[in-house]
Image (cartoon, rainbow, N blue to C red):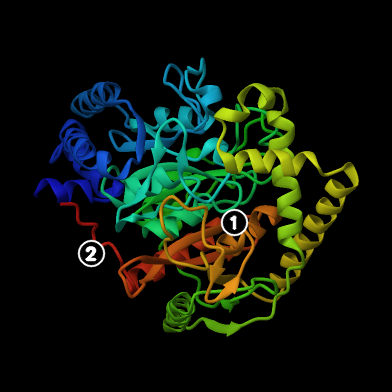
Amino acid sequence: MNKEDICFMSALEMREKIKTQELSSVEITETIIERIKKINPVINAFCTPTFEWARETAKKADEAVKKGEKLGSLQGIPTSIKDEMPIKGIRTTFGSKIYENYIPEEDDLCVSRLKKAGCVILGKTNMPEFGHHGFTRNLIFGESVNPWNIEKSTGGSSGGAAAAVASGLGPLALGADAGGSIRNPSSLCGVFGIKSTIGRVPLYPTIGLLSEIGLDQYGPIVRYVKDAALMLDVIKGSQHADKHSLPDQNISYLENIENKPRKLKIGYSFNLGFVKALEPIIKEKILDSVYKFEEFGYSVEEVKIKLKKPEYAFNIIFTSWFAYDLKRHYKKWKDLMSPTLVKFVEAGSNYGVLDYFKAMDIKKKLYEEVCRYFKKYDLLITPTMAVPAFDKGTDGPSVINGISVPPTGFTAFTFPFNLTGHPAASIPCGWSNDGLPIGMQIIGNRFEELLIFQVSNAFEEIAPWQDKRPIFN
């Protein structure tokens, strides 16, 4: 097996080879570190590598195997962590100059669970400042670029994580999603990512009111659907410190992923009743992909779901959060903040309490509308993004298919399901004419992560994408 094949191996295959010592964790980790050193200067996915720690952890993983000790479910598997999640003793910046030299004194709970499961942490991945936008650049580390075309954006805010996985810089990445930040870069970088039901993965500790607004959820970004199930099995489960966290369902997503439902009613939409514009190539690839589900005997039809004013609600809630959380830093740090984040803070500062509660009322009505939809259908399918990867250095397209769109226009299909809290995944489903990945979003009812995994795994079996790899000169 050559080194590149090792780097693009699934986490599950790595786990089996580590267990048998056909390949050691040290060998796998060293091979991936070598690739990171070669490719990261091109794509800027990792912002804070932790290679020596990774080597030490890999060595301990192999020793545990040789001693016949009980192994964690991620024993020896290389993993990256978005720079949003604190790791004890490792610089965590949130992409902000404010926290440029911050060294946490405790682990994020998800990080703690991953460590307990035996994973090898390769380092922190890049993000926009406080995850505020659908691109990945900041004033500390610069911009992450798309491995399929380095003149294009990774999307965001988990862009470093998605670019790393797509480039073979580790099979697992922990991302976060408050408006599409897992699904957006997964779509643009050609990988699989899932945002669970709000509360499925606990958030603790967090800075400010991140966990209070009920939008954000941590989750896996991977190349293989089963790897996401493996990872989510580890990080899910309640934590009293996060009052929104859900009790565990006491099921393993991985162990049940092959149990395809016999009958499903699937609806799809290209506008959700409000999306203004969509690139034709996206519609073409989604339409071709969604009807593949008929091969399993599933019913598929276009639906007229109508979500009203989600942009209005999302913009008020999201920008008000930044305005409140950053008010104590704003005067001192304004000139060292990302210009787009400054605009968010200023916009959020102009809303009043009645504006906020109007947004919360819309959020409530959006949730009710999606719940009505799921009384008739088992899944909802949409494009993940309205465009393939856009140019790096930009804030996203202002015109799509000849139509002017708001700043949320390119990610209009993702943020509504942060407002409603429903689980949603992005799965690769095709390529644009210039070779850029396209993602299909699969949305489930509350608590239906397993169904999303089962259907995504079935789709992967009939439309695999892992044979393509980015080429770096």
Q: Which residue is mark 2?
A: 467
At 83% from the left and 46% from the top, the residue drawn is: 356
Q: Residue 282: give x, y in percent of width and height.
A: 46, 74
Residue 351 point in image, percent of width and height = 82, 44
Callout in the foreground (1, 2): 2
Q: With respect to residue 395, does 294 lie above or below?
A: below
Q: Position of residue 469 (x, y in %)?
A: 23, 59
The answer to whether residue 240 is above or below residue 340 is above
Q: In front here: 305 or 248?
A: 305
Residue drawn at the location 41% of the way across and 53% of the way down: 392
Q: Residues within 10 Å of mark 2 (few under 14, many from 20)?
A: few
Q: Is residue 280 above or below residue 168?
A: below
The quarter of the displayed image where residue 444 is located: bottom right
Q: Can residue 356 be seen in the rendering of this structure?
A: yes
Determine which of the numbered discs, if any, sits on residue 198 in the image: none
Q: CA distance from mark 1 to mark 2?
A: 27 Å
Q: Nearer the viewer, residue 202 or 468?
A: 468
Q: Secondary structure at mark 1?
A: loop
**Where residue 423 is drawn, which disc sits there?**
1
Answer with the quarter of the image where residue 281 lies: bottom left
Name the kind of residue labelled 2 in the image: Asp
Q: Is residue 177 left or right of residue 19?
A: right
